[in-house]
Image (cartoon, rainbow, N blue to C red):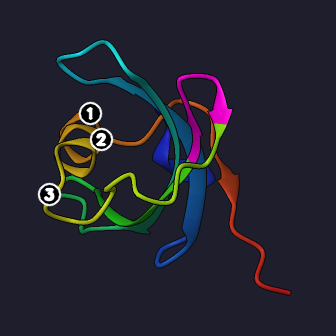
Amino acid sequence: MSTNLYKDGGEYFGTHYWWDEDENEYIVCATWKFEKNYPDMPDCWHLENLEMEMYNGYPRVPASDVSKTSAVWQAVEKEGPPFEMDEVDYS
């Protein structure tokens, strides 16, 4: 993933797929914040937010836990940002 495309401090979103131990499929939208570092240090991505989009093919399930302590969050954070992302537009 080329980091030249991303602005320092910019927020970007992309889709992640995750399955739990019962083979339930979660499709989540993750918001990532990009941090440009110095030439001798790698650039960083920080997971800012997760939103449930689909659960086993159904629209959002409000009771699904995607908080910072959830297994979904931990897996997405470990995986890192997806290859294709769009810039968050708050306008």
Mark 3 to mark 2 CA distance (whole Å): 26 Å
Q: Quadrant of residue 33?
A: bottom left
| Residue 69 x %, y % | 13, 62
Q: Please say if the residues under marks 2 and 1 sit with CB atoms less than 8 Å apart.
A: yes
Seen from the viewer's position, the closer of residues 56 and 69 is 56
Secondary-structure class at tag 1: helix
**Residue neighbourhood size for the residue with mark 3, other residues' Cα within 10 Å, grouped as few (<14), some (14–19), many (≥20):** few
Which residue position is annotated with label 1? 79
Seen from the viewer's position, the closer of residues 61 and 44 is 61
| Residue 51 x %, y % | 52, 58
Secondary-structure class at tag 3: loop
Mark 1 to mark 3 CA distance (whole Å): 23 Å
Seen from the viewer's position, the closer of residues 12 and 8 is 12
Quadrant housing the C terminus: bottom right
> Does the stretch in magenta take in 54?
yes
Residue depicted at x 28% and y 57%: 43
Residue range of the region highlighted in magenta in the rendering: 53-58
Mark 2 to mark 1 CA distance (whole Å): 5 Å
Q: Is residue 25 above or below residue 73?
A: above
What kind of residue is marked 2? Val
Looking at marks 1 and 3 on the same chain, the residue that comes earlier in the sequence is marked by 3
Q: Residue furthest right?
A: 91
> From the viewer's perspective, is the residue at label 1 or at label 3 nearer?
1
Which residue position is annotated with label 2? 76
Residue depicted at x 61% and y 49%: 60
